[in-house]
Image: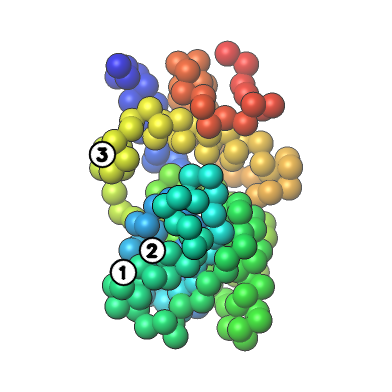
């Protein structure tokens, strides 16, 4: 049973993880690979709305996607986009990245090799990964404008889509931890974290939502 306080804290983290950007036309839309085909669906929707003339999907496989996406996350995203009507000529793939930093760095290399002039990027991720993706891209690719995007959905809708409330809370807590510690490790820019977000994070850690925390950097509880 998840308490009312835990749900309130989860909603605070959910809101913080989303950047609140309004999608606007960019040089390219980059979809970050994961288990969630909704990223590809959102990329297709933005493409069809004229927000980007080119899609790039990035991602290899991970323990959570190996069985579901045996050909690699980027390849499965591309197949999904073509199934939804995007011409193959409008899609590039990057098939080696295994983390967010590699997603950005290797996508940049693919675009440079293809001769694509990039001044702005529509960066598409899972809803709770928007801020992490943005912070990583701002460090790796500071000269371009980054516009964050994800599938428009509420926390309740996201929980319903995964059918595992505890897992969703654990993922939100883990994503917040990385925003706190990764800047010192050189993985992303530092962003201000409001006190109420920090307090919500600490309460959720104390309540045991810790399965996605990096073990060496767990907060004292």
Q: Helix or strand or loop: what does disc 2 sit on? A: helix
Asked if the residue at tag 3 contacts the one at tag 1, i.e. Cβ–Cβ closer than 8 Å, the answer is no
Asked if the residue at tag 3 contacts the one at tag 2, i.e. Cβ–Cβ closer than 8 Å, the answer is no
Residue at 61 percent of width and 59 percent of height = 97
* Nearer to us in this view, 154 or 194: 154
Q: Which residue is under mark 2?
A: 40
> In the drawing, does residue 195 fall left or right of residue 35?
right
Any part of residue 125 in sight: no
Specify which label sits upstream in the sequence, 1 or 3. 1
Compute the Cα span from label 1 to label 3. Answer: 22 Å
Specify which label sits upstream in the sequence, 2 or 3. 2
Residue 144, how many percent across, how many down?
60, 70
Q: Is residue 150 above or below residue 176?
A: below
Please, which residue is most extreme toward the right here?
185
Specify which label sits upstream in the sequence, 1 or 2. 2
Q: Is residue 155 above or below residue 120?
A: above
> In the drawing, does residue 140 fall left or right of residue 195?
right
Give the quadrant of the N terminus: top left
Residue at 39 percent of width and 35 percent of height = 168
> In the drawing, does residue 108 fall left or right of residue 209?
right
Q: Helix or strand or loop: what does disc 1 sit on? A: helix
Residue 199, how many percent across, how many down?
49, 23
* Nearer to us in this view, 186 or 91: 91
Q: Nearer the viewer, mark 1 or mark 3?
A: 3
Give the quadrant of the C terminus: top right
Q: Which residue is under mark 3?
A: 160
Q: Residue 45's mark?
A: 1
Quarter holding residue 49: bottom left
Compute the Cα span from label 2 to label 3. Answer: 19 Å
Residue 90, how many percent across, how many down?
44, 82
């Amino acid at each position: 049973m998840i308490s009312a306080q835990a749900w309130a804290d989860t909603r605070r983290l959910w809101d913080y993880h989303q950047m609140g950007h309004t999608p606007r036309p960019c040089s390219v839309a980059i979809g970050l690979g994961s288990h969630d085909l909704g990223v590809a669906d959102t990329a297709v929707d933005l493409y069809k709305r004229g927000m980007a003339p080119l899609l790039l999907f990035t991602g290899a496989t991970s323990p959570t996607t190996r069985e579901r996406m045996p050909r690699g996350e980027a390849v499965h995203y591309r197949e999904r986009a073509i199934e939804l009507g995007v011409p193959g000529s409008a899609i590039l793939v990057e098939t080696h990245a295994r983390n967010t930093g590699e997603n950005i760095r290797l996508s940049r290399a693919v675009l440079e090799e293809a001769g694509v002039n990039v001044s702005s990027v529509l960066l598409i991720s899972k809803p709770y990964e928007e801020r992490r993706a943005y912070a990583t891209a701002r460090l790796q690719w500071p000269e371009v404008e980054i516009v964050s995007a994800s599938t428009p959905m509420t926390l309740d809708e996201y929980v319903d889509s995964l059918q595992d409330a505890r897992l969703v809370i654990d993922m939100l807590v883990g994503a917040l931890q990385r925003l706190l510690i990764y800047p010192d490790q050189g993985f992303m820019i530092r962003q201000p974290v409001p006190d109420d977000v920090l307090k919500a994070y600490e309460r959720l850690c104390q309540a045991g939502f810790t399965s996605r925390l990096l073990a060496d950097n767990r907060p004292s509880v």
